[in-house]
Image (tube, rainbow, N blue to C red):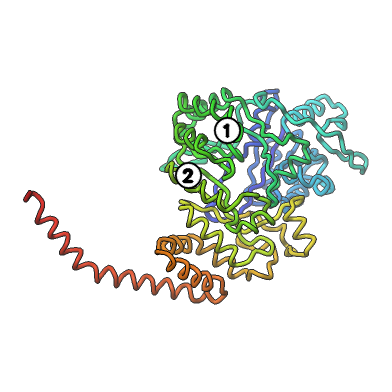
Amino acid sequence: MKLLVCYFDIINLKQWRKNYNFGIGAISAYLKKNGFDVQLYYISEIPQFEFLKKIFSEYMPDLIGFSFTSAQAQYVKQLAKMFKQISDIPIIAGGIHTIICPDEIINIPEIDMVCVCEGELALAELLTKIAQSSNYFEIDGIWYKSNGKIIKTKNRKYIEDLDIIPFGDRDLFNYSEMYEPKIEKRAPYICSRGCPYDCSYCANKVVRENLRLPSKIRFHSVDYVIEELKYLVKKYEIQYFRFDDDILPINMQWYENFIKKYKERINLPFSCNMRFNLINEEVLKLLVFGGCDQIQIGIESGNEEYRKQFLHRNMSQDMIIKNMKLINKYNLKMYAFNLLGGPEEKPMQILDTIKLNALGNVNMVQLSIMNVYPGTYIYDYCKKNNLLYDDYDKIPSYFDDKPVIKNPYLPFELLIFYKNNFFKLMRFYKKVFRLPQPFMKITCSFFDFMFTRQWIIKIFPIFQQAMYFYRNIRNILLFKPLVKKNAEIIEGVGKN
């Protein structure tokens, strides 16, 4: 039995590179272990009909699977129609958007089934029944169409022991070709499934509720993880791991065991995701001991009131600043996630985000203009208050600069100004924060006023040029005294 997996990754960004999908890799590995054949069609652009026909005729699958995110759902109908013109082979849809919006996807005429559970066991059972020409309308976790009716089966229990899944099928993605030749070989890795938190903009809560998942995170055993990491190092010559688990050190017993074995058997530098409320001396000491050099962490908003009310991240400003200092104490780099342009967010609140990144000495920032995902609090809030643009579901990536949320307090041009100049403004406020009190407060208030006015978009380039001119004049004026001083130092060398 053959499964053709169509993975949608159509992103309008010049530097976008193909990525490995952990869910598809796990499903493929499990199916192959059980004797099924899996082929991947990585869709980076909608194909011409003849090209799609060629792919189908070369592989001749028994089942076609679609996997896509909410941003990619806009392309599903088009491809499904094309496939149905080629063959009547059944099409099943899965992935995160299908899980959070199963009714929407099952009602697409060309989609025959949707998988509303973790796919490994369900797809193996489905392919087995198709091979046996058996009735497959009773598989838990898979909804079907029969005689024009939609049949919704029982929920399927989540996989308790993740170790029953073989190592991810990276060869399906031509994994070795995902690296640029002169760049250090960095591999993403996920040890776990799930997240216990309820951030208002994240689909994790919706997925957890729809799949009836436990609130706690499920981890592979430490030995399983270590063996797969050793396999990746040997096969792909990996030099650095980026752990993409929502939160790696959330289960302290597992985490301590993992760090000790990782240090002993892998001993490569790595980075991982963290939350400010979980940071303490013990956690950071273990990270440094294990070889961690960077923490990815969500600031999202630097305004405490907005962060709690709209993002449902109940962390105080004092606690975040305290733990930023602790991260700096252990010389760990900070890669901070920041969301801009949320509903009712004001310019001053974005400046608070910029200033918190500056105050915490953040090394790198990831900036996203807020998108919305069905079923989340932010989505429902925006729908209820008519804050979504008509084409909000046509944005292909959360790195896109196209607006999704209408904001009467924040002109879109100003939002883009903040995004494009975020790091420059960070560096500026870092300098302001080094000024002596109370001069620092006065200066900060003055520039807060300037940077929250829409005319700053036109003034800022002039301001930058003035600063550039000032630095050059200062360097010229200081050059002669500096040369004279250096000459005196050189002359005195060896005289004592």
Up the image or down, 342 lies above or below 288; here it is below
Q: Are marks 1 and 2 in contact (CB under 8 Å)?
A: no
Task: Judge by depth and name the residue closer to the eye, 320 or 228.
Answer: 320
| Element type where label 1 sits in the image | helix
Find the distance from the CA under tag 1 to the CA under tag 2: 37 Å
Q: Quadrant of the N terminus?
A: top right
Q: Which mark is residue 335?
A: none
Q: Residue at x 44, y 29 (%)?
A: 267
Task: Judge by depth and name the residue closer to the eye, 339 or 56.
Answer: 339
Q: How many marks?
A: 2
Up the image or down, 485 lies above or below 240; here it is below
In this rendering, would 463 be left or right of 105? left
- Asked whether the viewer can see residue 14, the reply is yes
Up the image or down, 48 lies above or below 133; here it is below
- The amino acid type found where label 1 is placed reads Asp
Place of residue 355 in the rendered image (x, y in percent of width and height, measured from the top left): 51, 60
Q: Residue furthest left?
A: 495
In this rendering, would 131 be left or right of 433? right
Q: Which residue is drawn at 24% across and 71% down?
A: 477
Residue assigned mark 2: 327
Residue assigned mark 1: 171
- The amino acid type found where label 2 is placed reads Ile
Q: How crowded is mark 1: few (under 14 residues within 10 Å), some or many (20 or more)?
A: few
- Asked whether the viewer can see residue 48, the reply is no
Place of residue 181 in the rendered image (x, y in percent of width and height, measured from the top left): 43, 41
- Mark 1 or mark 2, earlier in chain: 1
Place of residue 322 in the rendered image (x, y in percent of width and height, measured from the top left): 51, 48
Up the image or down, 6 lies above or below 412; here it is above
Q: Residue furthest front?
A: 438
Place of residue 230 in the rendered image (x, y in percent of width and height, measured from the top left): 50, 26
Q: Residue at x 78, y 63 (%)?
A: 385
